[in-house]
Structures are given as C-alpha cells and as structure tokens.
Image: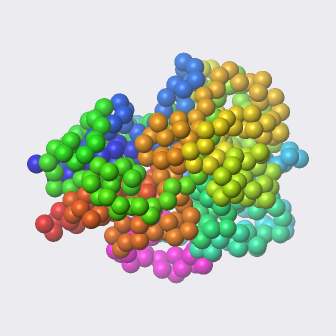
Amino acid sequence: MLDAVVVGAGPNGLTAAVELARRGLSVAVFEARDTVGGGARTEELTLPGFRHDPCSAAHPLGINSPAFRDMPLDRYGLEWLHAELPMAHPFPDGSAAVLSRSVAETAASFGPHDAGAYRRLVAPLLPKWDALVRDFMALPLTTLPRDPLTLARFGIAGLPPSTWLMRRFRDDRARALFSGLVAHAIAPLGGLGTGAVGLVFALAGHARGWPVARGGSQSISDALTAYLKDLGGAVHTDYEVKRLDDLPPARAYIFDTSPTALARIAGLGSCYARFRYGASVFKLDYALDGPVPWTAKEARSAGTVQVGPGSRDIAAALRAASREGRAPDKPFLITVQPSVMDPSRAPSGKHVFWAYGHVPSGWDGDLTDAVERQLERFAPGFRDRILARATAGPPELAARNANYVGGDIACGAVSGLQLLLRPKLSLSPYTTPHPAVFICSSASPPGPGVHGMSGHNAAKAVWRRIRAS
C-alpha cells in the first residue's frame, strides 16, 4: 500500500507529492493528460519553433513561493529570466506607469501627486516581505504569524475593497496600474480583500520581479517531476481517474482537481455544492514577425504589459464579464511577451506573445477582433506582425484543463468570502468528509497562481493525519 496518491500533476499536485516524498513517504501521481503541468505547460500552439504557454507565463508568485524556494529546483533545470521591467501599463498618450523592482522608480512613474502615497503604502511592507508572504500563504490557523504587526498593517490596507485603497491616489495613472494588478484575480474591483490582491502582486514584483521560466512554464512542472522521481516518487500520465477504485490502495488521496471533480470521483455528493466558479478569459497566443510595436518605450522592455486606458475602463470590463454576463466591447488585457526575456522561445528575430481579456463563464463567442483593436491602440501596426494565432475561449480552456470549469482559470471565483475561505467554510480547508481524501488545487488556500503553496499546505495536513493514524 502506498502512503499517498496524488490525482493531477499540476504544480500543486506535484508540490504536494514532493513534500510528502521528502518526509520519506511512498507517493505516486496520476495525471489524465499525456504530460505533466496543469496550468504550467508549454506547447507549440501556432507554428513550429514557437513555444507558447497555454495558461500561466509570468510567475511573480512562483519566484516568491516559499515552497519553491525551499526546493533545489534549479538543479533540475528551472531558471528564472527577468525583463528590464517586471510590468508596464501604457497610456494612450504614449507614456506608461511601471512596476519596477525599484519602489522609487515605480512611484515616479505615477507623477508627483501620487509618488509619496505609493511609497508610504509599500515601503514599510517590502523589508518584511519574506515573513509576510509565508504568513498569508501558510496553512491557515495552524501557526502563529511570524510578524503579526506587519501582517496586521497589510490587512488594514488590503482587506477592504481595492477601490477604498485607491482613494489615496489623486491621479488615474496609479489607479489604473493598481486596478490592473487587482484584475489578475478576474473579479470586480470592489470586492472584499481585493486591495490585498493588488498589494501582493506589487510587493512580489518589487521583491523578486515577474520572471518567466527559461524554455517556458513547462520547465517548472518538469523540475518538480524530476525532483519527485529522485525522491522515489512515481508519476503516471495518460491515466484518467473516474472513481477512487481506479487508484491503487493508499493511506491518503490528494486531489489537484476542481471541487466538482473531487466530489464526483470520491463520492462526496453535494459537499461542494456552494462552491462558486468565476468568470473566464479569452486567450490569444501569437507568433510574431518581430517585437510588439508598443508606442510606450517602457512597454517594449517589460515582461508583462497591462492594456487598459484607465481604472474606469478596467472596472467596466471586469463588471461586464463577472456581473453583467457579457463580453466587454473594450476588454482590459493582460499580456506577456516571453521572448523579450527568453529568445529561445521563438526562431531568431521572431517572438511569441499572448493576451487575454475577461469574458463570462462558458462564453462561446470570439473576442479576437476586440482584443486586436485594443492592442492596435497602444501598439499601432501590431496586426502586421502576426504570423499565426491560436485562440482559446472558455470551452477550449475547459477542454484543455478539467480544473477550469466554465473556463475559470482561477479554479473558483476569487471574490467575496471565497477569496479568503475556499473551497468551503472550514478550519481545515484541505480535508474532506472522507478521512483519507484531501484537496490541494487552486480551489484551496492561498488560491490561484503557479506557486505550489496549496499543495505544500495540503501535504502538511496529510502528514499530520498519517502520523496520527
């Protein structure tokens, strides 16, 4: 009998398996697809030689992850590559606000009225970042905070809606950039705790940047897999699990799946009936004949570029997708240009680039024209550089990854109490009514992102259960 079986070889499932194998337990991972990776894969989606990330590409949470930083993943081929700027937010006049590693440079890009306000917001938190990130990404309610005063200061600023936090800014340059940071959660800006989402991304960028993995996001998954195998763990691909009986006997079963799939496979009935899935995205991967011709020079040297003229435009686009059930006419776009940092991702002189805009759950329309019209506003001539494109709306995203129910790449709405309490109201979010079954996907704390912390935390819960038995 195995000690633990993990279902799903995404970053969280692989991290859970590694953490248990490091403790000397026998572990096997079973993945339905023919390769490991989940939301961290790399594929030739357009043309030969152009390596795209179907989902996550830039990794501010990955490089800052306490779980990943405690593993020797560099020995297994993981290398972080940085652009000159982690992120830029261009404006129609050709200027841009930036998220730089330097707080001062970032503040200066907002203009004189808001530079001081931004420094006062983030500068006191940044020196305590490593303790802070461990506190709010750790297993809930099991350890005392390492730095309770800093965590309290963060909570005072971050727990209210981001619209409250942004009142400290007088001009829209700062509000637009911060609204874009919050929009990574794919939820309206006025929700509980959305200020914390923006602060986390800002602090992560200042602390260690927003890098890509050399060769693509698949490198993260491959490094975790190689490390797991060296620890004695096994990984089985092309193995679809429809019920617990499909798996070998084990003392614990850990699911890197959606709560819906977990309930179905483990026979838990309506256990997660109240779990809410959120809005989706429409994603485009491009093979380009050259770099994106951004008007703003800052955007040309940034790894990630947020595309939306102002905070009201961003709020309207999120509201349309999340609350009004329609695709926005002028979508807010999150874009990543990996080949700016990693030329190996495309043939010489060519580039890979991706962009997504927010759309309702399950939406089956085509946002391509709206996305490209928005890109042309900030990068005139963009369409002339397109060699090929691959599109994926909610149905395609859900088909690629079963965890993306309705195309929700966050594996559950990141809004309301579910931002903090997921997948259900519980003091032990990784356990289920079945004593041997656990959940470790992004549907559990601390939530979405390629950081492995949901798997790390779930592994601790499994370890405690096994040790007590």
Is 402 colored magenta in this rendering? no
Please report the residue visible at 82 percent of the width from the left and 61 percent of the height from the top: 172
Is 142 colored magenta in this rendering? yes
- Please name whichever residue, 116 or 137, is drawn nearer the observer in this view of the structure: 137
Identify whether 330 is placed above or below 41.
below
Whether residue 111 can be seen here: yes
Indicate the quadrant where residue 343 lies. Answer: top right
Q: Is residue 259 left or right of residue 448?
A: left
What is the count of numbered marks?
0
- Please name whichever residue, 283 or 127, is drawn nearer the observer in this view of the structure: 283
- The residue at the far left in this view is 1
Q: Is residue 75 left or right of residue 279?
A: left
Residue 294, image x and y in percent? Answer: 78, 37
Whether residue 40 can be seen here: no
Q: Is residue 426 left or right of residue 281?
A: left
Please report the residue visible at 41 percent of the width from the left and 39 percent of the height from the top: 37
Tell me where the magenta segment starts and ends, as one range: 133-158
- The residue at the far top in this view is 48
Indicate the quadrant where residue 364 lies. Answer: top right
- Please name whichever residue, 167 or 341, is drawn nearer the observer in this view of the structure: 167
- The residue at the far right in this view is 93
Residue 50, image x and y in percent? Answer: 57, 24
Residue 12, image x and y in percent? Answer: 38, 50
Magenta-drawn stretch, dominant element (helix, strand or loop): helix
Quarter of the picture containing the C terminus is bottom left
Please report the residue visible at 49 percent of the width from the left and 29 percent of the height from the top: 43
Identify whether 18 is placed above or below 30.
below
Residue 46, image x and y in percent? Answer: 58, 23
- Colouring scheme, one of rainbow, by chain, secondary structure, one colour: rainbow
Please report the residue visible at 31 percent of the width from the left and 58 percent of the height from the top: 269
